[in-house]
Image (cartoon, rainbow, N blue to C red):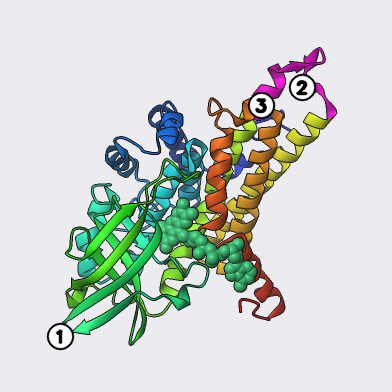
Amino acid sequence: PPPFDPADPLGIDELLDEDDLAVRAATRRWARERVLPHIAEWYERGEVPGLRELARELGALGALGMSLKGYGCAGASAVQYGLVCLELEAADSGIRSLVSVQGSLAMYAIHRYGSEEQRRHWLPAMASGETIGCFALTEPDHGSDPAGMRTRAERDGGDWLLTGRKMWITNGSLAGVAVVWAGTDDGVRGFLVPAGLPGFTATPIRHKGSLRASVTSELVLDGVRLPADAVLPEARGLRAPLGALSHARYGITWGALGAARSCFETALGYARVREQFGRPIGGFQLTQAKLADMAVELHKGLLLALHLGRRLDAGRLRPEQVSFGKLNNVREALEICRTARTVLGANGISMEYPVLRHMANLESVLTYEGTSEMHQLVIGKALTGLDAFR
Ligand code: FAD
């Protein structure tokens, strides 16, 4: 057998083809050059200068709406999209969040549920990063239970009037178009709301202790007047936003492991050189147990992500299977980051190292796109046939 590679102990790279490896290498290079040198500072400041330029570069990389077909999208495989999510999140979950929301939520919703005209109008500019999108489902009083949403769209002659509030919306203040979900007499529908319409405001949420290199906003819709063709014709009921969320969660299954990999590598490097009691702390059994457990969970998680990606590429991925991936990989990635934090001792809380930043970011990732508890309930329902949501 080939020699043991600490970076790929299970030989998972052998399961990837040349194109997969090329996409991964290009994304890794971009993240190392464009994000890593600055991310600690951006994170502390709570803003990313030049974010629109970064979005255009991500568009040029093909990372936006990456696995969608046509309309300027790369049409890549789900596995390649996953690898990109991982490499971006190894830099920061905030950058991966931008890409997830743009591609898997906003663009996916337009691609899957939009009219031909809507696709042609929005998708090429979104694929290039020229136009940024957001996806507004959550409200101040309705997170895990979006069915209770209060945002309403009422008919006014041929137009729609949209009123309500959306909370915790990634990319909200950057977005040229918001995909807003609202209740109608016909159930939940999706609306394309261009930025700048009278009555529509997006305000950044300040004082976040997590995902500080990501824009998160509150949206207020105060009688926003939309033409009849602003509605996504194929989206009816909550199944539509949940379909897009399932795609984004798949990407997160990979992405979270990027944050975990960064923390694992940091801990491994640190453990080799940091000496206490006259020798490297990596030589103590307790530290080795931590490193071994971290490596086991990281690479098990990768196998799971790859398995789900292959199923998605074959058109055989079920939402319950995505819940396995999101629940396990985010939970384990967070555990890896917390363990890495202990290996670094006091340095573990310093922003000189990426560990605390990744750890704090993953607290958001654990909650958004369906909390861990929601994914446990999804799996629990699938196993028992009993609905424990309410
Ligand atoms: P709640 O639903 O109030 O849940 C609170 C706790 O109660 C959780 O632990 C939950 O699991 C638990 N709980 C709730 N119901 C049950 C139950 N039946 N059984 C057991 N436990 C239960 N939303 C968007 O629409 N678009 C975005 O772009 C977006 N970006 C986000 C970015 C960030 C940084 C964050 C933090 C959130 C973002 N969200 C976004 C919102 C996110 O999806 C919600 O926060 C999430 O769905 C949880 O909703 P909530 O915060 O209202 O928590």
Q: Nearer the viewer, residue 172 or 265?
A: 172
Residue 347 pos. (x, y %): 63, 25
- Distance Cα–Cα, label 1 vs label 2: 72 Å
- Distance Cα–Cα, label 2 vs label 3: 14 Å
Q: Amino acid at mark 1?
A: Gly
Residue 252 pos. (x, y %): 52, 52
Q: Is residue 104 above or below residue 350?
A: below
Q: Which residue is mark 3?
A: 346
The boundaries of the magenta stretch are 267-285
Q: Is residue 14 left or right of residue 247?
A: right
Label 2 environment density (alpha carbons within 10 Å; few <14, some 14–19, many ≥20)? many
Q: Amino acid at mark 2?
A: Ile
User: Which is nearer the N-term, disc 1 or disc 3?
Assistant: 1
Task: Say if the magenta span includes residue 284.
Answer: yes
Looking at the rendering, which quadrant does residue 150 occupy? bottom left
Q: Which residue is mark 1?
A: 157
User: Which is nearer the N-term, disc 1 or disc 2?
Assistant: 1
Q: Amino acid at mark 3?
A: Ala
Q: Mark 3 near ligand 1 (CB under 8 Å)?
A: no
The quadrant the C terminus occupies is bottom right
Residue 312 seen in the figure: yes
Label 3 environment density (alpha carbons within 10 Å; few <14, some 14–19, many ≥20)? few
Q: Nearer the viewer, residue 259 or 79?
A: 259
Q: Which residue is mark 2?
A: 281
Residue 115 pos. (x, y %): 25, 72
Q: Is residue 216 above or below residue 23?
A: below
